[in-house]
């Protein structure tokens, strides 16, 4: 690659930070985010760069004559693995020298603005299906599939709605778990459902912080102690919120 | 109140396979994976769960979880290479069925009912099982680095194949 040094550090930093931000906001692993940012910088001729990625903010600096280090704050995190994949593709194209910083920046901005592929209604349907299947996998009786699926779907709907209006993730998760627990208890007391425990376990699975947990462990093992611990804390808090919600309903119901 | 047993005998293996496939694929949708990877996500979840069910008959739940998590991530790495997509897309959907939701639930329920003595071993077991998933994930990465020939070692799932 010739003439790569023409790219100004501002442009390169901009592209790197945008790529990092999108990946981190949508559930990428910390090591992948750091790696991607440094590879993009290297492809644009900035061989030595430093990225420091945490779940709540990214610091990025290029060695040499560049006058500044830049910081980007990450306020909201959700899960959209398709965007992680798309940024990965863009980074690969940059490495092959197919994109200039301006083009890459435009592509990334486009990815950032894209709405999720699966609308909430599709996700609710998926959560409903998953809950029914989990009930079977935990050896529930076939008669409990429908109650578990309904409770799971309603719980996930609750999560989406509460999150939209309350804007506090932890509280939304707690309320969603309360919805799951309350519906399961209602079904069992009406005779519609049979085994309360299994219905609840199946229905609560869509709320489980599986991605956070996996990422936390991978980050810790890769030596990203700060990110690993903070993602672990987020996973723990989510699990705690779900447990509290269910425990609240159970203590009312079984006493 | 009797404890729940998690012996996987009620549903025949083929039923378990179908249920875990649908569950893992549905989780792919919850995580917004690209459309063309939904089927592989389901397959990864199915392979992991069937491995767990079969191993759980002979082993304790913790080593069974470890082995199943290892198998899931090895499968996920293979898919990642084939599709040239970050490995997390496949591993996270595949791991979900192994998460010890049932044991954690039992532990939590014992605490709610003031049976702290029963809750502690259950909580420890849930913790051990999540730890086993973690170790399985890491182990597979080591296996991946060691076993694959150096030409394939250039990290197909990484942003850039070679420098």
Image (spheres, coloured by chain):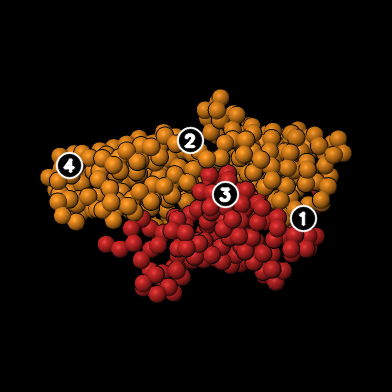
Task: List x then y, in percent, for residue B45.
Answer: 61, 58
Instruction: Tell me the residue that label 2 is attached to.
Output: A115
B145 in relation to A161, above or below: below
Chain hosting mark 4: A
Instruction: Tell me the residue that label 3 is attached to.
Output: B28
Distance from Cα at disc 2 to Cα at disc 3 = 17 Å
Task: List x then y, in percent, for residue A94.
Answer: 29, 51
| Viewer-proximal residue among A124 and B53 | A124
Residue that protrudes farthest toward the front in the picture:
A98
Badge 4 density bin: few <14, some 14–19, many ≥20, Cα 10 Å: some
Residue that protrudes farthest toward the top in the picture:
A165
**Chain ID for orange:** A
Badge 3 density bin: few <14, some 14–19, many ≥20, Cα 10 Å: many
B5 in relation to A104, above or below: below
Q: Secondary structure at mark 3?
A: helix
Is disc 3 on the same chain as disc 4? no
A172 in relation to A44, above or below: above
Instruction: Tell me the residue that label 1 is attached to.
Output: A139
Instruction: Tell me the residue that label 4 is attached to.
Output: A8
Task: List x then y, in percent, for residue A157.
Answer: 64, 33
Chain hosting mark 1: A
Residue at point 45% right, 63% down? B81
Q: Are marks 2 and 1 in contact (CB under 8 Å)?
A: no
């Amino acid at each position: 690659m010739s003439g790569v040094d023409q790219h100004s550090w501002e442009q390169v930093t901009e592209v790197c930070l945008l790529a990092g931000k999108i990946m981190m906001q949508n559930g990428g692993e910390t090591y992948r985010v750091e790696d991607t940012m440094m590879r993009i910088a290297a492809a644009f001729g900035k061989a030595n760069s430093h990225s420091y990625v945490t779940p709540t903010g990214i610091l990025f600096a290029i060695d040499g004559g560049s006058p500044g280090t830049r910081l980007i704050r990450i306020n909201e995190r959700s899960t959209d693995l398709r965007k992680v994949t798309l940024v990965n593709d863009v980074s690969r194209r940059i490495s092959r020298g197919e994109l200039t910083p301006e083009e890459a920046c435009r592509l990334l901005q486009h990815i950032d603005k894209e709405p999720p592929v699966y609308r909430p209604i599709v996700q609710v349907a998926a959560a409903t299906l998953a809950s029914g299947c989990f009930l079977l996998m935990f050896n529930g009786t076939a008669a409990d599939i429908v109650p578990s699926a309904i409770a799971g779907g309603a719980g996930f709907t609750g999560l989406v709605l509460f999150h939209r209006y309350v804007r506090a993730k932890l509280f939304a998760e707690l309320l969603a778990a309360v919805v799951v627990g309350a519906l399961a208890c209602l079904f069992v007391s009406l005779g519609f459902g049979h085994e309360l425990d299994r219905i609840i376990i199946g229905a609560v699975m869509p709320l489980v912080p599986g991605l956070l947990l996996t990422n936390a462990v991978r980050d810790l093992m890769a030596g990203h102690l700060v990110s690993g611990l903070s993602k672990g804390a987020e996973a723990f808090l989510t699990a705690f919120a779900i447990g509290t919600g269910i425990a609240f309903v159970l203590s009312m119901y079984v006493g | 109140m009797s404890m729940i047993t998690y012996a996987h005998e009620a549903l025949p293996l083929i039923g378990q396979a179908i249920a875990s496939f649908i569950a893992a694929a549905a989780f792919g949708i919850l995580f917004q994976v690209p459309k063309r990877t939904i089927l592989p996500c389901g397959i990864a979840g199915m392979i992991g769960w069937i491995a767990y069910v079969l191993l759980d008959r002979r082993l304790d739940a913790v080593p069974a979880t470890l082995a199943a998590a290892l198998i899931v991530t090895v499968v996920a790495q293979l898919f990642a290479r084939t599709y040239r997509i970050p490995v997390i897309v496949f591993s996270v959907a595949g791991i979900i069925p192994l998460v010890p939701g049932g044991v954690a639930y039992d532990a939590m329920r014992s605490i709610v009912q003031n049976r702290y003595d029963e809750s502690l071993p259950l909580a420890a077991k849930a913790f051990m099982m999540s730890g086993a998933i973690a170790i399985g994930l890491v182990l597979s990465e080591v296996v991946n680095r060691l076993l694959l020939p150096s030409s394939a070692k250039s990290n197909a799932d990484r942003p850039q194949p070679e420098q």
